[in-house]
Image: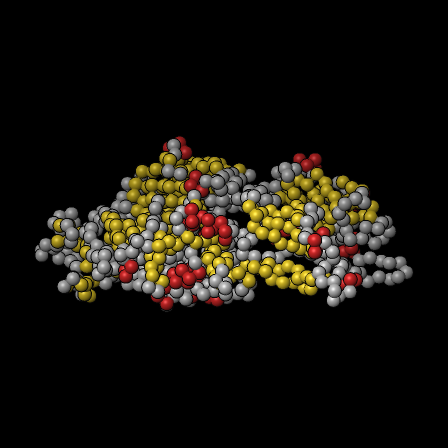
Amino acid sequence: MYLKFLGIFTAGVLLILFACSDDSDNPTWPFERTVLEIAIAKRPNFILTWRHPIERTGLLGYYIWIDTTVVRDYDQSVSPAQISLASRVIPYSGVGDGDSLDLTDFLGEFLERDSLHIAIWAGYFGKEQGVVQHKYIYFGDDMSPSIVNFSDSSSSDAIWIDWMRPTDQRDFYSPEITNGPIAGYNITVQARNSGEDIKNVGLEISLNGRIISTSNIRRSQRFRKRGRETILESVTNAAESKLLRFAIIDGKGFDIDNLQANNWQMKISGLMPEHAYRILVVAYDNAGNSSGPEEIENGTYINTTDAIPPLIASKFWLYQDSGDKLARLDSNRLILFWPRSVDPLTNSTQIKIDSMLHIPASCLPNSCYREVRGYLIEQNEGNSWKIISDIKSSYARHSLQNDSMVTKNDGDFVSDTLRWISPGDTIVLRIRAVDNSGAYSRAWTNTIYVSKGELWQYKCPQNFAPVKNDSDVFCMEKLQHISKDTFEVNVLHKEAKERCETLGNHLCTEEEWDAACTSRGSLYGVVEDGDFGISDFLSTYCGVGTGNSIFAKDPEKRNRICTSPDGIRDLPGQLQEWVVGKDSSGEEVPLLKGSSYAIFEGALKVELAQCKNKFTPTRIRPKFTANYDSLPLAKFKDTLLFYTLWKNNTLLGEDYVDQVEFRRRGDSTGLLQNGERIKWLDELWKGLEYKKKEPENEYKKPVLILGTESINAGNFFLDPTVGFRCCTGSK
C-alpha cells in the first residue's frame, strides 16, 4: 500500500431547471416565480430572509403579510384586495441573490403568542404569478430539558442519588445551543411500605461536591408551569400526604467547559434497613417545560441494604512463576484465589477473621449466616477504580492441597480470572463481598507484581518491556513515544531518530518491530482470543480504521486490551510508527509499520494490521526529459520549477513541479478552501517550508513531460496519524 500526496480540487454542481414554453409568448411555470429558501433567523432580532425566484424578468417586488387576518395560512394565490393590505412591500432591487426584512417592528402585539404566521409573495408585471409561501415564527420555549438519568447506591439507612444536570434547548432557531438554564428539580420519594413515615427523613444535596444551602431545598413545594415561566408552589393535596415531595433550585445551564460542575448528588438518610423506596427526579426549565411526567409510578425503586455487612478475609493466593516467584500468567490471564466470605444474620456469631474466616461449629448456615451474593473486584487506574470483575451469583469453590488449588464444592476459597494482564504489570486490586441486600463488606486492597515469565531476568528502563528476537533480547517502549503526557505525532523520520538517540536509545528497526509484533505466533501484535472476531477486536480495542483521533492521541483513553503477549501495546493500530528499514543494497530507509485510526477506503482492517506489512510514503510527480537530440524542439513546451524543502531552518532536500501545474495551483492565488486561499504546495507538504530555486542550467530550456513517476517521500513525510517508539538493549 502506498500513502500518496494528493492535491485538493473543488468542483461546483449547477442545477438548471427547464420549463416547457410556447415560443410565441414564453410563459413560465409558477414555481419559477415563487420565492425561494425562506428562513427566519434570530440575531437578536427576528430577520426574515429569502432568495429571489428563478425568473426575475418583470419582478416588481415582494408582498409580506403578518398574521392570518388578510392571507390565510393555506392560500396559494392572492387577490388585488389582499395585495393592497400587505403589511410590507419591498421593491425588487435587482442586486444580490436575495433580500431580507427585519420583523421587529411588527411583532410587539403578537409576543404573547407561541407562534406567528408570515406569508410572502413575489409580484410580477402581467398575469403569470408565483405561489404564496408560508412561514411561522416561534416565540415560546416549548423544548423540554433532556430526561434526568440517575445512578444510585445505598446503605442500611440511606440512599445516594447522582445525576448530571440535563441540557435544555431554549432557542428554536439555534438547535445546537443546549445549555439553557434549568430552574430546578421536582423530587418525589415514596416508601413501598405505606405505613412508613418518611416526611422527616434527612436531606443533603450537593452540587459539584459542595453542599447547597437548605434554602435551596423547598420541602412540600414543587415547580409547575404558569404561562411562559416556571413557578414554585406549595403541595397541599391531601392525597399526596404519604409522599415526600420537595423542590431543588438550580438556575444554571449545562456547563460544557467544566463537566464536573454539572454533577448533583442527593443523600436521603433516616430510612429503614432492607426497605424499598421509589424515587422520581423531574427537571424544569425556566419556561415551565418538564423533562418527564410527574406521576410517582414513573419512578425507580431503590432498596436499602442489610444492617449487618458481610465479613471478608484480606488475602489473595496466586500461582507463582518458577523464575522470579512472582504471580504467574496463563497467556494473558491471572487466576486469583481468596478466602470465601459470609453474611452474618446477627452481630453475635463469634466468627473470627485473620487470613481466613473461622466459623464456630455451632454457627450453622441459614441460622447465623448466609452465603454472600458475590464479590466486586476493582483495579486502580491512577485517580479512579475500574470494575474488572463484577458481582456474580456464584463462584467456583476450591481447596488448597499440596501447594495447588483443586475444585471442591465445600472449599474455603473462591476464584476468578482477570484477563488482559501483561508480563511485568503491577496491579493494585480492591475487593469487597456483597450480600443479597446489596450491602458491601469492608474493602481491602492488594498489590500484585506480575512475573515477566521466561524473560524475568532481563531488566528494561521504565515504560519499556523485554522482547525476544531469535537468540537476542531487547527492550521496546510499551506505548508509542510520549512527551509531556502526549504522544509525539507529526514528526519526520529524521526527528524520530533524533528523539530516541537523545534519550540514549534508538528508533526501533523493522526487524525489532516485527519481532515484537509476531511474538509467540501473533499475526497482529495482540493477544488473539477466540471470544472476538479479529476485525472487531482491531476496531474496538486497537482503533484500526475508526477515524477516532481522540482515543488514538490520548494515553489515558487508550484501551489496554490491545496488547501483545510481551506487554507491548497498540502495535496494530492507533498510530502508524516510523522504523528504520533497509533497502536491497543495505542502506537505511524510512518505513512505516502498523496501521492507524485513519480510514482507508476499501481496505480490510485484518490486512492493514498484519505485522509484516510496511508502508513507504510516496509522492507522484512529473517524469520528464530534456533531450533535444532525438525529439523535435516543438514538443518541448513545458519548464520545471525547482524548490528546496525546509523545517526549522534545516534543509531536507529538493523537489520540483512543472511550471504549468504550479501556475495553476501553486501560487498565492491557490485554491479556495473554507473561505481562505491556500497554496497547493503548502497542502502537498504540510508543515514544511518550500523555497523556489533557480533551475540548473540544463533545465532552463523547455522540457518534455513523459507522464508521472513515484518517488520515495519518506524524508519529507509529516502526518498526524504517525508516531514512533524507541528501542534499547536489555540488562
- Picture coordinates of residue 447 (x, y %)? 25, 50
Q: In this view, does 199 lie to the left or right of 481?
A: left
Q: Residue at x 10, y 54 (%)?
A: 360
Q: Is residue 458 above or below residue 140?
A: below
Residue in front for this viewpoint, 532 or 99: 532
Left or right position of 88 against 180: right
- Foreground pick, 103 / 649: 649
Judge whether residue 644 can be spotted in this image: yes
Relative to 179, is 516 on the left or the right? left
Q: Position of residue 449 (x, y in %)?
A: 26, 53
Q: Which residue is drawn at 56% across and 59% down?
A: 712
Residue 390, quarter of the rendered image: bottom left
Q: Quadrant of residue 116?
A: top right
**Residue at point 64%, 50% (across, down):** 643
Q: Which of 342 and 503 lies nearest the eye of the viewer?
A: 503
Location of residue 715 in the rendering, given as x and y in whole percent from the top left corner: 54, 54
- Residue at image point 70% right, 50% down: 37
Residue 302 visible to an observer of this rendering = no
Q: How many marks?
A: 0
* Residue 497, horizontal then vertical, whole percent: 46, 51
Q: Give the colouring mode of the picture.
A: secondary structure
Viewer-closest of 717 and 302: 717
